[in-house]
Amino acid sequence: MRKRCAARQSRVSRQLWHLGKKIMEVDAFVRANATRDIREVHPELVFLRLNRGEPLPRKKSEEGDALRRRLLKQSGFREIDRWLTQMRIGTGAKRDDVLDACAVALAAREPCGSVPEAASRDAHGLPMQIWF
């Protein structure tokens, strides 16, 4: 397997290819609602914050899953284990998707910072920041 530098990547990943349409829909929504306070959140930055800046194990590992559940419980998500055991087969959601969604909800409730702190603007004048 050849590794390539991200800056020199000439092809898009399969995941990005399948997400492309949804990304364009969200982009159009954000542009149409530029006066609203819409923020981008990265769940792994939220988990990093909850873990006091200490790196976490891979999210799909047993250790990573358990740590993320514990961090969410400490932040008020008391029913996370029940939610995960009651997930419906066929919804397409995976365990890590549910944990990520909870982390994003936490950032919406209690945003603690952003990267970068001062937002630069894109070609449409929208702020380019990721909140956690």
Image (spheres, rainbow, N blue to C red):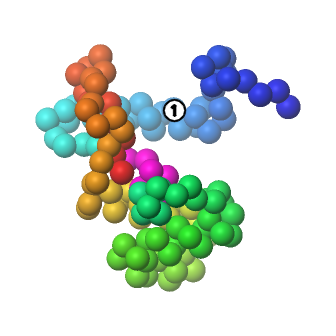
Give how far across and how far down residue 83 sits, in percent: 49, 77
Q: Quadrant of the N terminus?
A: top right
Q: Residue at x 73, y 24 (%)?
A: 4
Q: Secondary structure at mark 1?
A: helix
Q: Quadrant of residue 73?
A: bottom left
Would you place residue 99 above or below residue 39 in this image?
below
At a point 63% along the width and 25% down the height, the residue shown is 6
> Residue at (14%, 35%) from the top-left corner?
35
Does the magenta segment cover residue 60? no
The image quarter in which residue 9 lies: top right
Residue at the extreme left: 35
Is the residue 61 above or below the residue 115 in the image? below
Q: Is residue 40 visible?
A: no
Residue on which disc 1 sits: 20
- Give percent across and percent down for residue 120: 28, 25
Q: How many marks?
A: 1
**Do we see residue 1 in this rendering?**
yes
Q: Measuring 19% from the left and 33% from the top, which residue is drawn there?
A: 34
User: Magenta stretch mostly in which secondary structure?
Assistant: helix
Q: Amino acid at mark 1?
A: Gly
Q: Which residues are magenta?
A: 41-47
Within-10-Å neighbours for mark 1: few <14, some 14–19, many 20+: few
Reply above or below: 30 against 121: below
